[in-house]
Image (tube, helix red, strand yellow):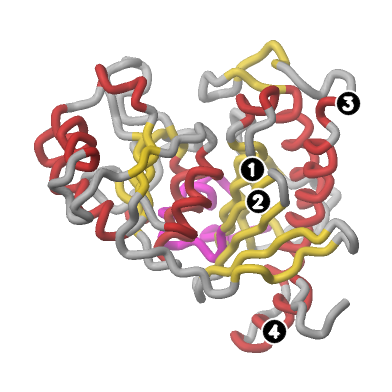
C-alpha cells in the first residue's frame, strides 16, 4: 500500500495515541467495519442471491415493512458485537426490545445502538442504502446493561457514524474530535482515509424533503419550502431539490456539499404525529456527526441532541444539515405552534 494512503486501522491507532484511548472503542469500531464489509458483499450481490431481495412478510416495532436483507444485516451486526467483551447492551431498529449480551460472553462498558439497513425499501431498485450507529458509555453499574443505558440523550454519545453501500462503500464517523470519511478499497479489502476533517458548509444550496407530504405539512413548513424555492432566500436564487428517500444517502450528500434535510411532523398518520424517524437509531447519531462537522440538527423546536429519550423506538421530526439553514427553519417553525 502506498505510504501516502492512511488505512482505517492506522488512523484509529493515531487517534488512540493522540487522545489517550484504551482501545475499547477501536475494537467496537473494527467489528462494525467487519460487519459492514459482510453486508456490503451481500448488497453487491443482492440481485444474484436467491431470497435476499424483497419483503420478509413482516413489520418491525415501528410498523415498517421489513426487507429480507434487513434481517440478515441485523443478525450480522449483532453477531459481530455480542462476544467481544466491550459491549454491555445493544438496541436495533429491527428489534422490539433491547438486545442483551449472552450470559456466556464477557460484558464491557459500551452501549451500541444501530439501524442495520437504513433506506432498505430502496434495495430492490438499487438505490444507496446504509448502516447508522451510535455508541454510548453505560450509565448503570453491574454486569449486564439495562434499558436506562440505551435511553441516553444524544449529547452523551461517545461516537457515531454511518456506512453507505453504493457505487463505493463509505464509512463516516466521529468520536467527538471532528469527522472523517473513509472509502473501501476493494482491491485490498481495507477502508482508507478519503475525506479527512469534513466540514459542512454553513449554508447550502440543496434541500431534501418528501414533497409528497406537502398537503400534511404545517403552515410554517410550507412557507419555508416556498421561501427556498424563491429568489428571496439568502442565496438570492432557488435551492435545488434533491431527495433520494434514503436518509443516510441524503445526509451524506448534504454533509459534503451543504444543504438541509427535512422530515418534519405532519398530519398524515395519526399514529406518528411527532415525526417518522427514530431518535435513537437515526436522528441522534447523524445529529452528532452533523454538529461535529459544523452543522446542526433540530426537531424544528429543539436541538435533537438535547432530547431525553422515553422509549427505544421514539420518533421525532428531523431537520438536519447546514447550521444557518436549520436555524432559519426554526424561525419558520414557530408558525407551526
Residue found 37% across the figure and 38% down from its top: 241
Q: Which residue is under mark 3?
A: 48
In the image, residue 100 above or below residue 142:
above
In the image, residue 328 above or below residue 181:
above
Q: Which span of residues is magenta-colored?
A: 138-160
Question: Is there a contact, CB below 8 Å, between mark 2 and mark 4?
Answer: no
CA–CA distance in space, label 4 to label 3: 40 Å
Q: Is residue 152 left or right of residue 59?
A: left
Classify mark 1: residues with Cα within 10 Å, few (<14), some (14-19) or many (20+): many
CA–CA distance in space, label 1 to label 3: 20 Å
Q: Secondary structure at mark 3?
A: helix
Label ID, residue 130: 1
- Of labels 2 and 4, earlier in sequence is 4
- Of labels 3 and 2, earlier in sequence is 3
In the image, residue 1 above or below residue 137:
below
Q: Indicate the position of residue 284 as horizontal and vertical percent values.
A: 45, 50
Q: Which residue is under mark 4?
A: 14
Amino acid at each position: 500500500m502506498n505510504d501516502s494512503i492512511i488505512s482505517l486501522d492506522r488512523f484509529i491507532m493515531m487517534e488512540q495515541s493522540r487522545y489517550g484511548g484504551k482501545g475499547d472503542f477501536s475494537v467496537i469500531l473494527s467489528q462494525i467495519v467487519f460487519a459492514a464489509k459482510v453486508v456490503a458483499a451481500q448488497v453487491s450481490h443482492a440481485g444474484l442471491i436467491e431470497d435476499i431481495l424483497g419483503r420478509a412478510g413482516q413489520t418491525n416495532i415501528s410498523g415498517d415493512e421489513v426487507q429480507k436483507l434487513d434481517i440478515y444485516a441485523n443478525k450480522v451486526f449483532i453477531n459481530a458485537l455480542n462476544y467481544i467483551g466491550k459491549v454491555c447492551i445493544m438496541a436495533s431498529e429491527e428489534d422490539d426490545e433491547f438486545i442483551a449480551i449472552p450470559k456466556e460472553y464477557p460484558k464491557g462498558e459500551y452501549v451500541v445502538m444501530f439501524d442495520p439497513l437504513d433506506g432498505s425499501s430502496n434495495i430492490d431498485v438499487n438505490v444507496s442504502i446504509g448502516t447508522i450507529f451510535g455508541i454510548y458509555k453505560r450509565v448503570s453499574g453491574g454486569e449486564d446493561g439495562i434499558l436506562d443505558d440505551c435511553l441516553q440523550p444524544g449529547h452523551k454519545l461517545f461516537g457515531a457514524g454511518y456506512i453507505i453501500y453504493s457505487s463505493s462503500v463509505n464509512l463516516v464517523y466521529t468520536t467527538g474530535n471532528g469527522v472523517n470519511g473513509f472509502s473501501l478499497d476493494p482491491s485490498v479489502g481495507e477502508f482508507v482515509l478519503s475525506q479527512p476533517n469534513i466540514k459542512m458548509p454553513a449554508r447550502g444550496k440543496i434541500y431534501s424533503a418528501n414533497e409528497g407530504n406537502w398537503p400534511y405539512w404545517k403552515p410554517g413548513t410550507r412557507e419555508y419550502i416556498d421561501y427556498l424555492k424563491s429568489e428571496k432566500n439568502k442565496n438570492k436564487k432557488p435551492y435545488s431539490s434533491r431527495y433520494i428517500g434514503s436518509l443516510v444517502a441524503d445526509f451524506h450528500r448534504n454533509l459534503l456539499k451543504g444543504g438541509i434535510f427535512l422530515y418534519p411532523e405532519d398530519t398524515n398518520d395519526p399514529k406518528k404525529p411527532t415525526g417518522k424517524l427514530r431518535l435513537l437509531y437515526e436522528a441522534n447519531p447523524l445529529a452528532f456527526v452533523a454538529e461535529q462537522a459544523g452543522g446542526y440538527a433540530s426537531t424544528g423546536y429543539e436541538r435533537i441532541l438535547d432530547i431525553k429519550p422515553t422509549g427505544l423506538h421514539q420518533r421525532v421530526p428531523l431537520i438536519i444539515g447546514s447550521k444557518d439553514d436549520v436555524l432559519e427553519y426554526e424561525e419558520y417553525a414557530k408558525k407551526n405552534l
